[in-house]
Amino acid sequence: MRKRTRARECALQVLYQIDVTSDLPQDSLEAYWAENDEPQEIREFASKIVCGTQEKKDDIDKIISKYAENWTLQRMAVVDRNILRLAAYELLYCPDTPPKVCINEAVELAKKFADPDSGKFVNGILDGIHKETKKDAK
């Protein structure tokens, strides 16, 4: 498994924990790393995603809500919601990651950790976000 793919999986697990427990990101990261031995490169990228996603969560949630027709964030499965958050963070705030990679990695996370239909759901929302950001950049 590629390092960034593994880092995204770690970030998803930490974001899930934060969402469920309302713990602080740093506390959740410390607890996760205490239980999961990962190389420093994976820890750094996962931590960047977790902290960045939490820092920009209000903005990210507004954008996700705009594209999640007939769905509120509270109604979404916790896994889906956090996959969308971390992928939206990468799409919007990590210009070094190509949009196609962000979306594909999110769909793969959904296939692995969520419902069978979650991949389509995640893809549709992220595609909408990407198209708008691409349009706004012109």
Image (cartoon, rainbow, N blue to C red):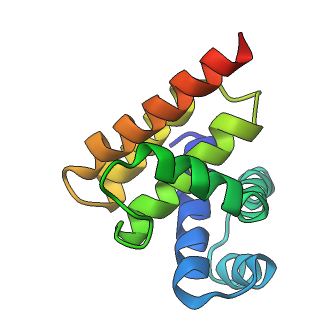
Lateral position of residue 106 relative to residue 130, left or right:
left
What residue do we see at 61% from left, 72% from top?
14
Answer above or below: position of 42 versus 82: above
Answer above or below: position of 96 versus 35: above
> Where residue 123 appears, x then y in whole percent?
37, 37
> Where residue 133 appears, x then y in whole percent?
63, 26
Counting every numbered tag in the picture gives: 0
Lateral position of residue 130 relative to residue 55, left or right:
left
Asked if residue 3 shows in the view, the reply is no
Answer above or below: position of 134 versus 76: above
Lateral position of residue 4 relative to residue 103, left or right:
right
Q: Quadrant of residue 58?
A: bottom right
Of 89 and 134, the residue lying toward us? 134
Furthest toward the top, the residue is 138
What residue do we see at 54% from left, 62% from top?
12
> Where residue 59 appears, x then y in whole percent?
69, 54
Answer above or below: position of 104 versus 63: above
Lateral position of residue 124 relative to residue 37, left or right:
left
What residue do we see at 58% from left, 58% from top?
61
Of 23 and 37, the residue lying toward us? 23
Q: Quadrant of the C terminus?
A: top right
Asked if residue 9 shows in the view, the reply is yes
> Where residue 33 appears, x then y in whole percent?
70, 76
What residue do we see at 78% from left, 55% from top?
48
